[in-house]
Amino acid sequence: MSDVIRLGVAGATGYAGQELIRLAARHSGVTVTTAMASGTTDVVRTLPSLVRVWDGEITALSVDRLAAETDAVFMTLPDRVAAEVGPALVARGVRVFDLSGAFRLRDRAQRRRWYPATPDLDAPAVYGLTEHYRAALPEARLVACPGCYPTAAVLALRPLVDAGLLEGDIVIDAKSGISGAGKTPSERTHFSECHGSVAAYSIFEHRHAAEIEQELERAVTFTPHLVPLDRGILETIYVRVRSTVSETMVATTLEQAYADAPFVRLTGDALPEIKHVTHTNFCDIGWRMDTPSRRLILITCLDNLVKGAAGQALQNLNVAFGLDETTGLS
Ligand SMILES: NC(=O)c1ccc[n+]([C@@H]2O[C@H](COP(=O)([O-])OP(=O)(O)OC[C@H]3O[C@@H](n4cnc5c(N)ncnc54)[C@H](OP(=O)(O)O)[C@@H]3O)[C@@H](O)[C@H]2O)c1
């Protein structure tokens, strides 16, 4: 095997797949050898938006070809397709980075509820929130990259939960640009429905709530909204701290957790904005605390297609293959 990692992208014509190819094309340690989509015939497709960035061909999905031509595959596929393709690739010795939700939930009952097509595996996937699972990545065969909403929420909350600083309810008010729903328009996501409007959706029914609760080991109230942006997520998180907790303790806990995390930017009381993170792999986290009432409000934001999808997947590959974590991402 040469030093350059041969990559496959399954789902290359989608939003996350195209973002991955764009990032991989300027990554010095990888080459995209194989890109596939849903075709069932020999008709070859190209990506007009990536001309002169990556001029390869998109062919029909084939596990045999991915196994023969690649060292690692990014699956940017619908959950039910990833559920089938992922284990087949792992069985053929390919390292798999799955961007779908198929393998994120470790609890079998939760997985059956939210991802019924996912089979039980002998070895569970490594949850690919790089900053918190870095040590497990070099041995991982299957990496379940986190959802976009959970990435922002868990990065902000997990250090505070782990340090025992919080009590009471956690309320996550989340807003996402429309590309979070993928490229196929629906009545909810097409332009004339979204433009000029903001709408809540999937209250108590969004599967990302289960993922956030898994990673925090706490119940959360999670309300997602669609906002008329093409990309970006911003979450406003309402919590209460314990009576002994100061604002300095909050800041120190987050600073210690992310001292060696190149893609987490702690902005303190300079509150993050979506326009500061789009087209980057950063997750920005800011906060304000009202000491008398013990209320802490965290603002966290990222680009759903980069840190919430393709960028984080590439960050995981870098760590898994022993490359510098920032290669191709800074
Ligand atoms: N969008 C986000 O912000 C985001 C963030 C994190 C994770 N994710 C997850 O990443 C995955 C991809 O998301 P996306 O937004 O990129 O979706 P998308 O824009 O809808 O793209 C889906 C891709 O999968 C391919 N595909 C669909 N059915 C297939 C089949 N039966 N066999 C082979 N290929 C098939 C499509 O190919 P065709 O062009 O041929 O249809 C397309 O390339 C999803 O599981 C999603 O939940 C998305």
Image (tube, helix red, strand yellow):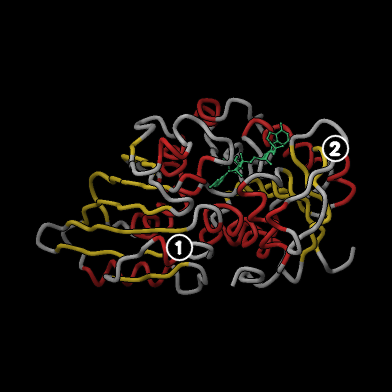
Q: Which amino acid does label 1 sit on?
A: Cys
> Quadrant of the rendered structure where residue 213 is?
top left
Q: In this view, does 217 lie above or below 241?
A: above
> How far is disc 2 from disc 1 in space, using C-alphas?
39 Å
Secondary structure of residue under mark 1: strand
Residue at 46% of width from left, 67% of height from top? 264
Query: How many residues crowd mark 2 within 10 Å: few (<14), some (14–19), many (20+)?
Result: few
Q: Where is the N terminus found, in terms of image quarters?
A: bottom right
Q: Residue furthest left?
A: 292
Q: Mark 2 sits on what residue?
A: 43
Question: Residue drawn 80% across and 38% down?
Answer: 61
219 sits left or right of 245 in the view: right
Mark 2 lies on a secondary structure that is loop
Give the residue number, with chain letter if any, for mark 1.
Answer: 283
Q: Position of residue 150 (x, y in %)?
A: 45, 48
Q: Tell me the tag on residue 263.
A: none
Whichever of callouts 2 and 1 sits on the residue coming sooner in the sequence is: 2
Q: Nearer the viewer, mark 2 or mark 1?
A: 2
Amino acid type indicated by mark 2: Val
The quarter of the rendered structure image containing the C terminus is bottom right
- Measured as percent of width and height from the top left, residue 184 is found at 58, 36
- Quadrant hosting residue 192: top left
Mark 1 burial class by Cα count in 10 Å: few <14, some 14-19, many 20+? many
